[in-house]
Amino acid sequence: MAHSVHSERSIHEMLKDTPPMNESTSAIHSGTEPKPFKAPNSLPLRNVSAPATPMSPTSPTQNGNGNGSDSNLLRSSASKIDTIKNWSISTYKCTRQLMLEKLGKSQRTVDSELEAQIEQLRETQRKYLSILRLTRALSSHFHHVVVTQHALAEAFSDLAQKSPELQEEFTYNSETQRNLTKNGELLLSALNFFTSSVNTLCNKTIDDTLITIRQYETARIEYDAYRMDLENSRPEPPNSPISEDLQTNFARHKEQYEKLRADVAVKMQFLDENRIKVMHKQLVLLHNAVAAYFSGNATALEGTLKQFNIKLKSPNSVTGSWLEQ
Amino acid sequence: MAHSVHSERSIHEMLKDTPPMNESTSAIHSGTEPKPFKAPNSLPLRNVSAPATPMSPTSPTQNGNGNGSDSNLLRSSASKIDTIKNWSISTYKCTRQLMLEKLGKSQRTVDSELEAQIEQLRETQRKYLSILRLTRALSSHFHHVVVTQHALAEAFSDLAQKSPELQEEFTYNSETQRNLTKNGELLLSALNFFTSSVNTLCNKTIDDTLITIRQYETARIEYDAYRMDLENSRPEPPNSPISEDLQTNFARHKEQYEKLRADVAVKMQFLDENRIKVMHKQLVLLHNAVAAYFSGNATALEGTLKQFNIKLKSPNSVTGSWLEQ
C-alpha cells in the first residue's frame, strides 16, 4: 500500500517538476535564463509511458553491468508491475470521470471565481501574444524602412555632389533621410526592448502559472473521480477495509486538489501584480518612444531610452549591419 | 537609282518612327499615355531581317490572293532584290567602318561636347533609376508599417476596453498608432506621387531622347563609312559616274548625320530643362512631406499634398485595402 502511494504520488511529482514561482517571477526581465522544463500540454493521465519514469533509477545499473539477474531486478520488476497496475486504475478512473462529466452523469467540483480568473488569464495571454506578433512585425517592417532610408541618404548625397543644378534639393533630402536613419535606430531599440519584455511575460511568466493551472485541473478530475468512488460505495459498512481504502484515497486527492487550488490562487495574484507592473512600464516606453520619434523629437527619444536603461548598439555595429544588407 | 535611294532611306524612316519630341515632353505628368513605339536597342545595321520591312506593302497581296504571278509580282521581286542588294552594301560598309574604327584604322567623326553630354545623360538616368528603386522600396516597406500600425491601434483599443487596470496606457497607445496610420496614408500618397513622376521622367522622357541618340549614333557610322569611301576613291577622275555616285551618297549621309546631331542637341537641351523642373518639384515635395510627417506636423503634411495637387484615396478605399490584408 505504501509503495502504491509512492508510485501514484510520483505522477504528481513529475508534474510538479517545474521551477518554483519566485524564480520565474523575478526572472521576467533577464531574457537570458535557460528555458525551464516544460510539462506536456496534454493531460498526463493519457500519457502511456508515464509509469516508466518513476522506475528509472534501476535502469542505468541494468544497462551498465550487463545481465545482472539478482533479487534487486526481481523486486524492480514486481514494483514496475505494481506501478503500471496503479497507474492504469488511476487513468481509468479519471478517464471515466471525464466521460461522465461530458455526458452530464457526474457532478464536477466547480470554483467559479477561480475558473473565471483562469479563463481571463488565458484570454489575456492570447491578446498579449497578438500584440507581441504585431509589434514584432512593426519592428521588422520599420527595420527595412530604416535600411532603405540609409541607402537613400547615400544616393541623394552622391547626386548632390554630381548635380550642381539640383545640389540644394538633393542635399537637404540626403540630410533628412540621414537624420531619420539615426533616430530610427533608437526607435528600433525601444521596439525590440518592448517585444523582448512582452515575450518573456507571455511565454515564460504567464506560461509558468498556466503549468500550475494544468496540474490543478488534473488534480480536480482525480479528486472528483475518488469522490464519486466514495459516494457510490455508500452501501458498504463504514469500517470495512474497502471503505477505509476509499476514504484514504479520497482524503489524499482532496488534500492534493486543495493544495494546488491554493497554489494557483497565489500564483495568479502574484502574476497579475507582475503583469500590470511590466505592461505599464512597457506601454509607457512604447508610447513615449513612438511619440518622440514621430514628432521628430530626438532629445526626448534619447531621454526615453535612457529612462528605461535600454542599451544601444555601438555606432560601428550599426554601420556593420547595414553593410551586410 | 531613285528606287535605291528610297529603299535606303526607308531604314532611317523605320528608325524615326517614334513620337515627336513635343508630345513626349508635354506628356511627362500624364502617366497614362500608351507606351511609345520603341526602336530596337541594337544597331539596326546588324538586323538581318531589315530589308523585309520596307518591302512589306506587297507581301499581304501575295499572301492574300494565293499565287498571283502578274507583272506586279515580277516588279516587286526585282525591287526586293535591289533592296537586299543596297541594304547589304550599306550593312557591309557600316560593319567594315565599325571594325576599322575598333582597329584604329579609320578616323571617326567626333563631337566631344555632344558625346560628353550623352554620356552624362546615360549616367543621370542610371542614378535616377537607382533613386526610383529605393523610393519604391521605401514606399512598400512604409506601407507595411502603416498596415501594422492600423492593426496595432485596433488591438490596443480592444485591450483598453477589456483591461480596466491598464486602460489609460492602452488607450493612448491606440490613439497614437491611429494618428500615425492616418498621417502615414498621406505620406504614402506623396511617396507614390514621387515614384510615379520619377518613373515617367526616367522610363519615358529620358528614354525618348535616348532613342534619337541611338539614331544619331547610327547615322554617324553611316556618314563616316561613306566619307571613307569618298576619300579612298581620290585616284578616280572627279567627273566620272562612280565619283559622282560617291559624292551623292556622301552628301546624303552627311545631311542625315547633321540633321540628327542637331535634333539630339535640341532634344537634350529641352530634356535638361524639363528634367531640372520635374526633379526640383519632386525633391521639394519629397522633402516637405517627409519632414512634415516625421515631425508630427499633420497640417503641414496635408498642406504639402494640396500644394502638389495630390489626390488622396477616399477613406473607404483606404479601409478597403486594409481589410484585404
Image (cartoon, coloured by chain):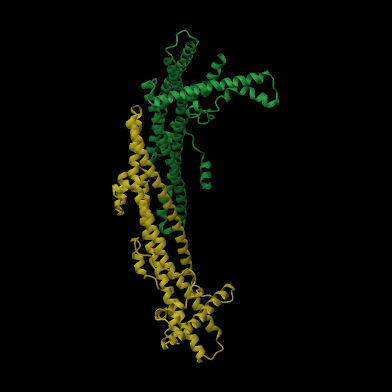
Chain colours: A green, B yellow
Give whichever of B178, B52 is nearer the camera. Answer: B52
Give whichever of B251, B40 is nearer the camera. Answer: B40
Compared to A109, does B63 lie above or below? below
Q: Quadrant of residue B28?
A: bottom left
On screen, residue A221 versus residue A48, left or right, reads left
Farthest residue to the front: give it.
A235
The residue under the point 48% across, 29% down is: A42
Give whichever of B193, B291 is nearer the camera. Answer: B193
Looking at the image, can residue A212 be seen?
no
Give whichever of B77, B259 is nearer the camera. Answer: B77
The residue under the point 48% across, 9% down is: A240
Farthest residue to the top: give it.
A239
Placement of the N terminus of chain B among the 4 image quadrants: bottom left
Residue A220 % position (x, y): 44, 21
Residue A316 % position (x, y): 53, 42
The residue under the point 55% across, 86% down is: B233
Q: Quadrant of residue B210?
A: bottom left
Residue A234 % position (x, y): 42, 12
